[in-house]
Amino acid sequence: DDVVVFAAASLKNALDTAAATYRETTGRTVLVSYAGTATLAKQIEQQAPADIFIAADTAWMDYVADRSLIVPDTRHTLLGNRIVLIAPAASDATIAIAPGMDLAALLGDGLLAMANTEAVPAGRYGKAALQSLGAWDSVAGHIVEADNVRTALAFVARGEAPLGIVYATDAAAEPAVRVIGVFPEDSHPPVRYPVAMIAASTNPDARAFYDFLLSDAARPAFETEGFTVIDAGS
Amino acid sequence: MTLAVDISARAGGFALDAAFESAGRITALFGHSGAGKTTLVNLIAGLARPERGAIAIDGDTLVDTTRGVFVPAHRRRIGYVFQEGRLFPHLSVRRNLVYGRRFSTTKERWADFDTIVDLLGIASLLERQPAGLSGGEKQRVAIGRALLASPRLLLMDEPLASLDEARKADLLPYIERLRDEMRLPIVYVSHAIDEVARIADTMVLLVGGKVVANGPVSDILARADLRAHTGQQEASVVLTLRVGAPGPDPHLTTLEHPAGRFSVPRLDQAEGSEIRMRIRARDVALAVGDPGNLSIRNRLSATVTAIVEAEPPTVEVSLDAAGMPLIASITGEAVRALGLRVGQPVTALIKSSSFDRAAFGPAARPSDA
Amino acid sequence: MTLAVDISARAGGFALDAAFESAGRITALFGHSGAGKTTLVNLIAGLARPERGAIAIDGDTLVDTTRGVFVPAHRRRIGYVFQEGRLFPHLSVRRNLVYGRRFSTTKERWADFDTIVDLLGIASLLERQPAGLSGGEKQRVAIGRALLASPRLLLMDEPLASLDEARKADLLPYIERLRDEMRLPIVYVSHAIDEVARIADTMVLLVGGKVVANGPVSDILARADLRAHTGQQEASVVLTLRVGAPGPDPHLTTLEHPAGRFSVPRLDQAEGSEIRMRIRARDVALAVGDPGNLSIRNRLSATVTAIVEAEPPTVEVSLDAAGMPLIASITGEAVRALGLRVGQPVTALIKSSSFDRAAFGPAARPSDA
Amino acid sequence: MLEPLTPQEWSAIGLSLRVAFAAALCGLPIGLLAAYVLARFRFPGRAILDGIVYLPLVMPPVVTGYLLLLAFGRRGPVGEFLERTFGIVLAFNWTGAALAAGIMGLPLMVRAMRLSLEAIDRRYEDAAATLGASRPIVLLTITLPLMLPGILAGTVLAFARALGEFGATITFVGNIPGVTQTIPSAIWSYTQVPGGEAAALRLTLIAVVIAFAALLASEALSRRAGRRVLGQ
Amino acid sequence: MLEPLTPQEWSAIGLSLRVAFAAALCGLPIGLLAAYVLARFRFPGRAILDGIVYLPLVMPPVVTGYLLLLAFGRRGPVGEFLERTFGIVLAFNWTGAALAAGIMGLPLMVRAMRLSLEAIDRRYEDAAATLGASRPIVLLTITLPLMLPGILAGTVLAFARALGEFGATITFVGNIPGVTQTIPSAIWSYTQVPGGEAAALRLTLIAVVIAFAALLASEALSRRAGRRVLGQ
Ligand SMILES: Nc1ncnc2c1ncn2[C@@H]1O[C@H](COP(=O)(O)OP(=O)(O)OP(=O)(O)O)[C@@H](O)[C@H]1O
Ligand SMILES: Nc1ncnc2c1ncn2[C@@H]1O[C@H](COP(=O)(O)OP(=O)(O)OP(=O)(O)O)[C@@H](O)[C@H]1O
Ligand code: MOO
Ligand SMILES: [Mg+2]
Ligand SMILES: [Mg+2]
């Protein structure tokens, strides 16, 4: 049977490339089921036929770990990402991302596009960053939330919202937006994509792909998309 | 066949209470618009449930509320020609016609497709869809459909109302043949007293949901008290006469009447067979003494038995013609001019040509059931 | 009113080619089932478009394919009583009835709600929904609905077929009143030759989609060559006679006939007014010499003008009664027995009571339009 | 489940009701028009129109939402026109949510109405014309009343769909609490955090109860109309 | 747009077709039964059944999918039962996708069928009974043919909905290429990464074309049936 990976949707391009590389070198096919991390976690809870889980945040990985659904010592942080403040490409808005910044003034009567600040990791990181920079309270009533970071990006790209907070990976690939600034890593919990093998997996090939993901061979696939590859063990 | 009905039912604010028995080959349901004829026919067909009561055919119970019996419509083998056609809109005329065929067993099946199609003149319509048919065409197909299901009892709710006279004249003998040759009992709803008088032997008269009379058609038509309900303007008698030996004119059929000569336009009935005919009082004239040189050849010797004032100027003179009844309706002026009185011998004059084809029917052959 | 029709139309495989003009107050459309009557009526109503041709009422063009004129149905003010009722199922009887009211201007509105409801006997149905009505009730409501729209021309497609005799007898005089008092021209489709003869003055005879004859009803009924199409079994004449001075019996009305005495059951018509009546050949008997002491009081002196063999045994004897036509249908046997020949003087005998109410109608008053 | 609703939840419920009503009611004339045109006229491009009406059903809601954003966003051609001409802004506005929900419900609405319309015996309309009723009057007094079951069914379908619509709405107008956060958006948020199931189910139940009420109301109306047609 | 489709996309199209056909065809008898029961019988709990049929429309698809996962998942009561008794596994299987799509389409199907059924003049059924047809035969020969427009409309609605269904499917059976990845799941995946729009639109167009073909086929069938009823 083919190895089945459950992965957060935002990893699609990178993981598809990695899987293609893997197939070229080993001849073995890997199937990746992309969905929201929450959905994947709940499916795994319902004995989904997954061999490997790559989450977009640690909370849902904790969720499956708490239920002993993963092989504990296979949990590793695979990738990192950054969140950035963006504006439409044509915008000349500038602001230094630092404590006390006056984001509200920059917004004017526009809205700040973010992924859902309670539910979606990208949104949660953004909220934490704004809070730690003291800008949250002044913009809280002026946020338009999306169900995922891609929609938030689209809001800015389409010029509907003057500013937005998205992953660096998304911003880099979208010519219609301009990165105004990158949020300091210490202003929010680090953006991490943990990986783990599923406890119920019986696929003998799973381990090989897992190892491949953590190996240097997979590195270019992730880095091309703008992810930071977190060295195993770090 | 005996149809025994004793039911109460209601539809909206309308209450039907009908109890009658009919052993007739054709039972006419007669009554004004809204009298409950269709309601009653629906109950017999099994399309409606009575509140209480029972319906049985030849002792075979179809409904009996006290015993909780209710035979569903499809098991009754009762054909129904609806007042409004109700052809299946999604089936061709042919498939409408044969619809009921497959539900009868070969043994029960007496209806022949080609015969019925020819008779109804619908051969050219077979591949058509009902929606394009004219009013009369629809009704003919509906009759054919009911017949082709080979029912054991046929309900016809004003089946001929939308047909022209020529077609009616074609169909009535066929209905008689169904009655006589196929021995198919029929419950026949009609407003046309001529039709009823011709083909029905038993009549159930409905007024406002109640049966006010039922029995032989001749008895009911003769009852003056029912005339308002039967919608007749005037009296008539129904006689059953035997076909006599052929006379000199081959186009006339002589009927044996004890009171005198009686010939009518030729009937295709064998000598000795019985004929039922309705003689309307308006068609009977009277002569006192020698009638003179008249074109009216049918002359019956009779005695006046009663003289009754009907709606002026009409007076109905009841006659006894050698034991057979006859009624003449003439004007009061004529009664006075002729000096008519009870007991007086008169000659009843009846024009041969006052009968049209529709007035005659072979008397229903006694059922052997 | 003049209705001028000259059109070709087709429906499926059926082709209608009708050209006629009628200046009649009531124009009867007569023809066998499937002859195209409903098709023609639909064209007049504006519910169908002809392939080519024109229809005009009093010179007001409704359709003219050459000029591209097509007045839509709702602007024609042509009432239509459909063969199948077509009551609006979602509206109560009352709301069905008044539906067309609001579309006529006050000036055009001649129909009175209460009068029409009473006449049709539907007062008790007003709050009901159409679905619960009996067949005849539906049809009466449909007639009322068409009338209450105050049309300038009324199309009636077999309007009385589902009504009982009593109701028919009530409605026919009303239709006559519409014709005479409301001056409402009517196109009347019917299979019942009696009805047509009584109320229509003009008749259009359709056979297989073609008009084979049109003109005054009396002319068409008198034409022996059309009898197969009119569905009549026998001949008749339609006479227009003047009401004469009252005689001794108040229940009889004397009609002025130049050939002799002629009285009929009382008509509520003023002395001097004109009456139209149909006298069926079967109701006329002949006497050569003194008729004797008969109950038949109407005796007209006449001369035999023709003796025509009809369907045996019937022979039709045409008469000239002081310039007015009359036909007697008697048996060949009678002709021989009386030794009848052309030119012979005879007495025509007509029973007063052979006319029922339905046979008479006031002659349509000359239109002043 | 028995905890009181938060103000945000209350406002989501209020907003969802507003959006669903607006979607169903504003969709009504458009749906009727589309149903009428599709059922009654034969014209070139009819099949295309028919297909277009179905589009929102076939496309994943996210795509529909994205296309709406492209067209009706402030920078979209239609959106720009609407804003410039009428001052109407749909993006990030509850009206945009209603538009999204309405469009998602349109295929359902049109289908139901068309079925009813096509089942009507046109001879009733002919009869009305002979009584003097012009085409629009026939439509109002005969056609529409006779297609009432379909209109009601279509409206309830659209209403229910609007209550459940999430993908297109959030992609088009996002999720601004109190402005564009409808019940489904709120539910979705709950499902995305560990332990949010109970709150999600509670809101789901509320949506279901609302839809149920609408359904019962429409059935009652429909039955009343039907009873009338069948003769009390 | 003109690049050849990837094998994964081909398999998504094939799977979507399979899922949509299965959803529409297996839904058919269930939808018919529900429509028949709802239209023809009055029984306690009828309103509840009516409401349940509407549920999938009202609930956000994600919730429906989650409930399906809870019920039909391998650990869910129904799922466990089905696996133990019949060896049927729905979760993470294309059959599960069909189930999800079928359930999402059911309200549309039932509604369309019910409208058609309620528009049938029951006197035709009475007429058939007097000709000897038993209840099931009447159903087969009169009722079903007369409600054909509704059956077709309902089936196409369900088919189209199945082609567009995403939320419930991805939540219930996931998005495993070749196994459970339908066109909408593939589209959604594309929308979640930079630069995926073109691929997403291309797949959307394919879904639209398929739905369009189904629509045209059903219209043609329906017109043929209709023409028959109206007399060629
Ligand atoms: N559902 C109903 N609600 C109220 N009244 C009804 C209902 N069904 C029938 N009726 C009434 O019952 C009476 C009898 O109806 P039925 O159809 O049996 O009459 P009918 O004798 O067949 O008349 P017709 O000769 O006009 O067809 C009518 O007055 C009708 O209005
Ligand atoms: N759509 C159609 N397709 C084919 N034939 C049709 C269509 N419409 C009408 N006809 C045919 O046209 C002929 C005339 O129909 P029409 O309804 O005018 O007859 P009618 O004279 O009114 O008959 P009836 O007295 O039976 O009502 C009929 O033979 C009918 O079958
Ligand atoms: O990677 Mo996510 O779970 O689509 O934000
Ligand atoms: Mg009746
Ligand atoms: Mg006709």
Image: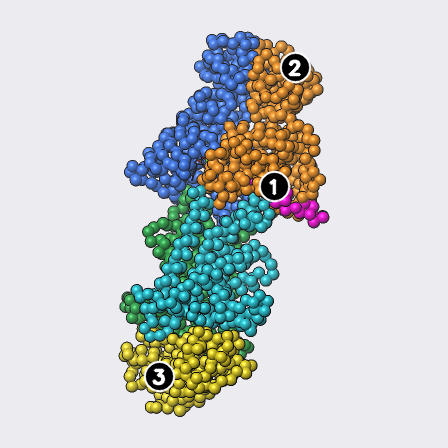
Chain colours: A yellow, B blue, C orange, D cyan, E green
Does mark 1's beta carbon lie closer than 8 Å to ligand 5? no
The mark found on residue B107 in the picture is none
Q: Secondary structure at mark 1?
A: loop
The mark found on residue C260 in the picture is 2
- x, y (%) of residue B308? 48, 14
Q: Which residues are magenta?
A: C63-82
The amino acid type of the residue labelled 1 equals Ser
Q: Is residue B164 left or right of residue C127?
A: right
Discs 1, 3: same chain: no
- x, y (%) of residue C167? 51, 30
Q: Does residue E5 lie above or below A186 as drawn? A: above
Of B117 and C156, the residue lying toward us: C156
Label 2 packing within 10 angstroms: few (<14), some (14-19), many (20+): some
Q: Chain of mark 2?
A: C
The amino acid type of the residue labelled 2 equals Gly
Does mark 2's beta carbon lie closer than 8 Å to ligand 2? no
- x, y (%) of residue A221? 44, 87
Of A157 and B335, the residue lying toward us: A157
Q: Nearer the viewer, mark 1 or mark 3?
A: 1
Residue behind mark 3:
A195
The mark found on residue C104 in the picture is 1
Rendered-image quadrant of the C terminus of chain D: top left
Q: Does residue B202 lie above or below D42 as drawn? A: above
Q: Does residue C41 lie above or below C281 as drawn? A: below
